[in-house]
Image (cartoon, rainbow, N blue to C red):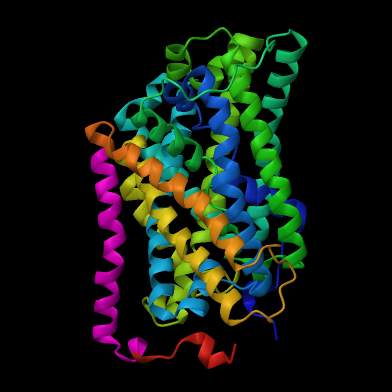
Amino acid sequence: MPSPLSLKKIRPLQLIAVIFFTVSGGPYGLEPLLTYAGQHGALLLLLLTPLLWDLPAIFTVLELNSMMPVTGGYYKWVKHALGTRWGFYEGWWTWLYTFIDLAIYPVLFVLYASFFFPWLSDYHYKIPLCLIFIWLSAGLNILGIVPVGKTSLFLGAAVLTPFIILFGLAFYHHTVTTIPSPSLKGIPFSSLGMALYTVMWNCLGWDNVTTYAEEVEKPVRSYIFSMFAAFALVIVIYFLIILVSQQSGLNIGALKEGAFPAVGAAVGGRWLGDLIALAGMASSFGIYAAVLLSVSRVPKVMADDDLLPKRLNRLHSQFQTPYVSIIVCSLVGSVMILWPFLDLLIIDVTVYGAGLSLEYISLIKLRMVSPDVHRPFKIPLNITGLCLMIILPVTVYFVALAGAFSSADEAVWAAVFAIVVLTSAELVWRLIVWKKPHLNASPNPLQRSGL
C-alpha cells in the first residue's frame, strides 16, 4: 500500500520548475558577482564554478537517488551508508542551512517590491511584509506538493519571460557586441572567495529536490531528465544576464544599487525594469515555496527514526503533508529575517558544503560495499575516478572559505559562525544518545539490510 505522501505526484515538467526554483529561481542575487570578479573574471567563474561545483553534485545525487528514491533523500542515503550518527549530522546540518537559506528570500521579495514602493524598505513595513510572505508560503506547502508544483510552473514562466524579452532586445539592438576575454588576474583573493560564494549560492540545492522522491511520477527517469534540463536552463540564463549587464552601459555602482531591474530599464526602458522587478518578487516566492517543500520532509523522516520529536512527523488529516514540520520551519524563518544578506550567504554555503561532503562519502562507501545493487543511473567512473571527481567541488569549497577568512571582518565572523553551527551537530547528537542509548548501539544499516 503506498504511503500517504505518494498518493498525489508531480510530473517531469512540474519537477523541472520545482528544481529550477530550489536551485536558482532566476539570476536574482547574482548581481554582486561583477563587483567581486570584474568584467573579465565574472563570466569565467560563472562557467567554471558550476562545472566544478554543481556537476559532481548532480551526478552523485542522480546515482544515489536512483538507488533509493525515497522520502528524506540525502538524509536516508547517508544514514543507509554511514550509519545513524552521520545520518543525523546530514539531516541536522541541512535543516540548519535551509533555515538560513529561507531567511534570504522574504528580504529579496521586499527589495524588489520596494522598486515600486520605496517606503517598503522601512523597517516598520519590511518585517510585517516578510512575515506575510513566510506564512502564505507555509499555507501553500500544507496544501501539498501538487499545488507547489503548479505554482512553481506558473511562477517559472513569470520569471523567465522578462529575461527572454531582455535578451531579445539586447541582441536586437546590438547591446551585446563582444565577450570580454576571460581572466582572473588582478582579483584579490578575498574578492575571489566572495565571487565563488556568490556563484555557489546561486547554484546549490540539487540534493534538496530528492527529499520528496516518492511524490514524483517515475522518479528515476523524471529526475534524470528534469535535473539536466534545469541545469542547462540555469547556466544559460546566468551567462546571458551577466553578459548583457556588462554591456548595458551601467557602471558597477549603478548595477549594485539598482540590480537587474536597472539593466532592464537601461536596455528596454522603465517598463522592462518593472517587469524584471515583478519577476524578482515571483522568483523569491517560488524559491521559498520550493525550498520549504524540500526541507519540511527531512524533520518528518528524522522524527520517524526517533532522532527528533515525534510531533514533527504528524501529517495533515486532509492534505497528508507534514504540517507541523512546515510550521516549525516557518517559525524559525520568521526569526532569522533580520540577518544581513552577506552573512546569510556565507553561512548558507559553508554549512551546505559540509552536508554535501557526506553525500560524496556515501557514494564512495556504497560503491565499495554494495557494488552489485541495481543503479538505474550510474556515474561511468570507477572508485578512483569518483575520488578525483570529488576533489573538484571540495577544492572550490575550501578556496571560497579561505577567501572569506581573508576578507572583511563581517565575512570572517560569518564563516566562524558557520563552523560553530557545524559543530552543534555533535553536541545535539550526544544529547540524543544520552536520552536514547539504543541509537548509538544500533548496527550499521548496510549490515542490517545485508547489502
Q: In which quarter of the image is residue 46?
A: top right
Q: Which residue lies furthest to the front in this view?
A: 384
Question: Is residue 295 toward the left or the right of residue 21 in the image?
Answer: left
From the top left corner, tell me how far across and down residue 420 is, in percent: 25, 56
Query: Residue drawn 77% across and 11% down?
Result: 172
Question: Is residue 56 toward the left or the right of residue 175 in the image?
Answer: left
From the top left corner, tell me how far across and down residue 313 is, in percent: 47, 75
- In this view, the residue in front, 258 or 428, is 428
Q: Does the magenta stretch include residue 351?
A: no
Question: Is residue 170 toward the left or the right of residue 40 in the image?
Answer: right
Q: Can residue 27 be seen in this view?
A: no
Say if 270 sits above or below 367 in the image. above
Query: Residue drawn 30% across and 51% down?
Result: 418
State the extent of the magenta-drawn residues as a range: 412-440
Query: Residue drawn 67% across and 53% down?
Result: 149
From the top left corner, tell me how far across and down residue 154 is, in percent: 70, 42
Dividing the image into 4 quarters, which one contains the C terminus? bottom right
Say if 332 sits above or below 284 in the image. below
- In this view, the residue in front, 116 or 90, is 90
From the top left corner, tell me how far across and down residue 135 is, in percent: 45, 50
> Dominant secondary structure of the magenta stretch?
helix
How many marks the image carries: the answer is 0
Question: Is residue 209 toward the left or the right of residue 92 in the image?
Answer: right
